Image (cartoon, rainbow, N blue to C red):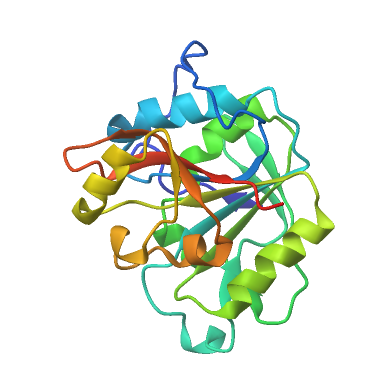
Amino acid sequence: MNRTYHQEIFYPTKINFNTNESIQLLATGNYDFMVLPHASFNYIQDILQTAFNSIKDLNFDLITILSSLHRPLLDKDKSSFAVIRPKGKIENYQYSIPIVSLDEEGICENEEYFIEESSPEIILPFISHYFKGIPILEVLAYKYSLNLDNLIEKIKSKNRKTLFIIMDNFTEKAKKNIQESQNTCYNMELNNLTPTSGIWIKAAKGSWKILKSCGKNYTYALAIRKEIL
């Protein structure tokens, strides 16, 4: 059994879900990637709530959470390009979420990395509340490589109704772009993202639409990728 490590540090034990606030996503409703911020819960609660209210009526077979690893891989895992949680369930006294695995060369299963990395965990209460019983796949990567592009395509080919959630923050450099692109799609530049991130956005490619942002320097934002047909 996997467990949670960051409750009461980055997010509260009990969350009062507000089902009222939502926003219109792309007109067609067709998209497969969403960028959500990671930070202390009181900074990003509104964005997380808006995001999940907006997708709660959609059907997914799998939710894949893509996050950055903020330190190099351990020596024993150096031959891997990504890390996942072991198959099973992630449980605490509030929820139980099934976790799927991947049998792919270059991917290691190691729970240790998720003790340090909080970004995937902060959205688990929302997934459990709005998508009860839907399995998740949590993936961490330390640096970009074409292996990440290929991994995304493999996951999509096996699970057609997959929502990819990238946990990523913006930098002050992105402020102008975010302000100007609230109602348009644009290609995110990697220098608009924090130094340890941006790798999954590069792997996902495509054009993005900023739907909501907050923070002094617009560092926390909700974005979706225009579906690549």
Residue at figure coordinates x 70%, y 29% from the top left? 132
Question: Does residue 140 lie above or below 161 as drawn?
Answer: below
Question: Does residue 63 lie above or below 139 as drawn?
Answer: above
Q: Position of residue 203 (x, y in %)?
A: 55, 67
Q: Position of residue 199 (x, y in %)?
A: 46, 67
Q: Position of residue 65 (x, y in %)?
A: 57, 52
Q: Is residue 51 left or right of residue 60?
A: left
Q: Quadrant of residue 161?
A: top right
Q: Which one is nearer the viewer's eye here, 79 or 153?
A: 153
Q: Is residue 175 left or right of residue 159?
A: left
Q: Residue furthest left?
A: 216
Q: Quadrant of residue 55?
A: top right
Question: Does residue 199 lie above or below 226 as drawn?
Answer: below
Residue at figure coordinates x 42%, y 58% from the top left? 117
Can residue 101 be seen from the camera position used here?
no
Question: Does residue 185 lie above or below 115 as drawn?
Answer: above
Can residue 156 be seen from the camera position used here?
yes
Residue at figure coordinates x 54%, y 28% from the top left? 52
Q: Position of residue 164 (x, y in %)?
A: 61, 49
Q: Residue furthest top?
A: 20
Q: Which one is nearer the viewer's eye here, 69 or 96?
A: 69
Q: Is residue 183 left or right of residue 57?
A: left
Q: Which one is nearer the viewer's eye here, 150 or 74?
A: 150
Query: Looking at the image, how many numbered discs can be counted on the residues?
Result: 0
Residue at figure coordinates x 75%, y 32% from the top left? 59
